[in-house]
Image (cartoon, rainbow, N blue to C red):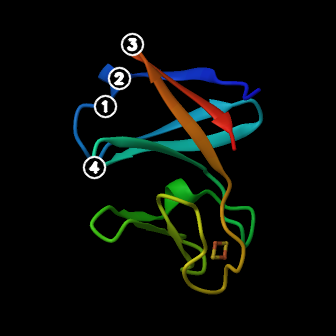
Amino acid sequence: MADFRAVAQLNEFTSDEDVLVVNYGRFSVLLYKIDGEFFAMEDRCSHADVLLSDGEIDFSMCRIQCHKHGAMFDLKNGQALTPPAVVGVKMFAVKVTDQTITIAPK
Ligand code: FES
């Protein structure tokens, strides 16, 4: 059974393009909303050990770009979209119960 853990409260999101950096055990995780649905992605590029939160998010294109070498990843499924990354980024399942946002590894 998935180990969902509370990482944030709904009221921490004040606009549609807010991105929170939360922790799940040893993982740093990006938490954000697309069209009202929450997504959680590990805050680490699959190409090298750098933070994706230092990169650029483009919600209109549903992608995040790593600042180091420019690889892009799909914000909904973590898939690598452009080189030099060839492996996707780990995603977490998200549940909202009352006002609390919980995540668990997929
Ligand atoms: S470290 Fe992210 S693309 Fe190279």
Q: Are marks 4 and 2 in contact (CB under 8 Å)?
A: no
Identify the secondary structure beneath mark 1: loop
Q: Marks 4/3: CA distance?
A: 19 Å
Above or below, 26 against 47 in this view is above
Disc 4 target residue: 35
Return the mark for residue 22: none
Q: Quadrant of residue 106?
A: top right
Disc 1 target residue: 13
Q: Marks 2/1: CA distance?
A: 6 Å
User: Which-is-in-front pick, marks 3 and 2?
Assistant: 3
Return the mark for residue 98: 3
Distance from mark 3 CB to nearest ligand 1 atom below 8 Å: no
Q: Quadrant of residue 12?
A: top left
Identify the secondary structure beneath mark 2: helix
Q: Identify which amino acid the numbered label 2 is placed on.
A: Leu
Q: Marks 4/2: CA distance?
A: 15 Å
